[in-house]
Image (tube, coloured by chain):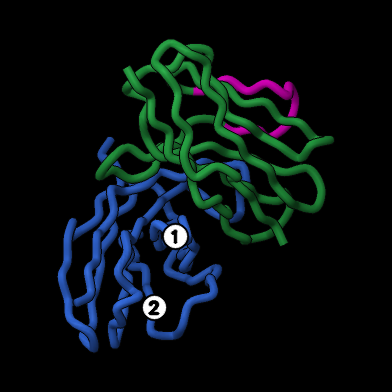
Amino acid sequence: AQSVAQPEDQVNVAEGNPLTVKCTYSVSGNPYLFWYVQYPNRGLQFLLKYITGDNLVKGSYGFEAEFNKSQTSFHLKKPSALVSDSALYFCAVRAPNSGNTPLVFGKGTRLSVIA
Amino acid sequence: KAGVTQTPRYLIKTRGQQVTLSCSPISGHRSVSWYQQTPGQGLQFLFEYFSETQRNKGNFPGRFSGRQFSNSRSEMNVSTLELGDSALYLCASSSLGGAATNEKLFFGSGTQLSVL
């Protein structure tokens, strides 16, 4: 079975500082990994995904994530946080060649960027 | 291109009632998935429909059901509502859904259901 863990419920960072939102996964084989963001009163929006290739994936709004197979992690990062980055972030995983199994989401990490 | 549309935006019901939620996917998308979002549990998968067929189902009781129409619009029904059903219900669409495991999902803004 595939699963994903986001160990921090809340991350606080000062505007202009780098930010990291952590994600670890458990899946058989090489995973497909995703990050989504949810702004208040909105649905989830796709940020980036790792399928194969370069371990550093660049996505929307200046975000990037690094796939680390040995640590089974896929942490989301941004060099300089903005107040507008404050939102709920979800990591998700799916095993390749897994038929119709759905995307499995973590419980989310709330990011607060303080001016 | 219009995004995923969910109606209604808010619903207030009492225990024992039933409710129907609607989702219109992005034009051309044939897969519609439903998720329940609660603060403690995050997003939990309910079911996925593709070309009017339920292709996958999560671990929810039979009170939760859904269907998809020929135009890919989907409805979700919850019967005999319980207090614990209070949640944000999200619908997501994609072109091929589970058959293309690296596809991203496009989410609607959700229906906030409150059960009193």
Q: Quadrant of residue B81?
A: bottom left
Q: Where residue B91 sits in the image (x, y, percent)? A: 36, 56
Q: Residue at x 43, y 39 (%)?
A: A110
Mark 2 residue element: strand
Q: Which residue in the protein does label 1 denote?
A: B40
Which residues lie in the magenta part? A49-59
Q: Where residue B15 sits in the image (x, y, percent)? A: 23, 84
The chain assigned the colour blue in the figure is: B
Q: Residue at x 49, y 63 (%)?
A: B45
Q: Is residue B99 above or below residue B63?
A: above
Quarter of the figure that contains the C terminus of chain B = bottom left
The chain assigned the colour green in the figure is: A
Question: Given contact means CB atoms under 8 Å apart, are the residues at marks 2 and 1 in contact?
Answer: no
Kind of residue at disc 2: Ser
Residue A57's disc is: none
Disc 1 crowd rating (10 Å Cα; few below 14, some 14-19, many 20+) is few
Which comes sooner in the sequence, label 2 or label 1?
A: 1
Q: On the rendered structure, is B22 left or right of B28?
A: left
Distance CA(mark 2)–CA(mark 1): 23 Å
Q: Quadrant of residue A76?
A: top right
Q: Is residue A53 magenta?
A: yes
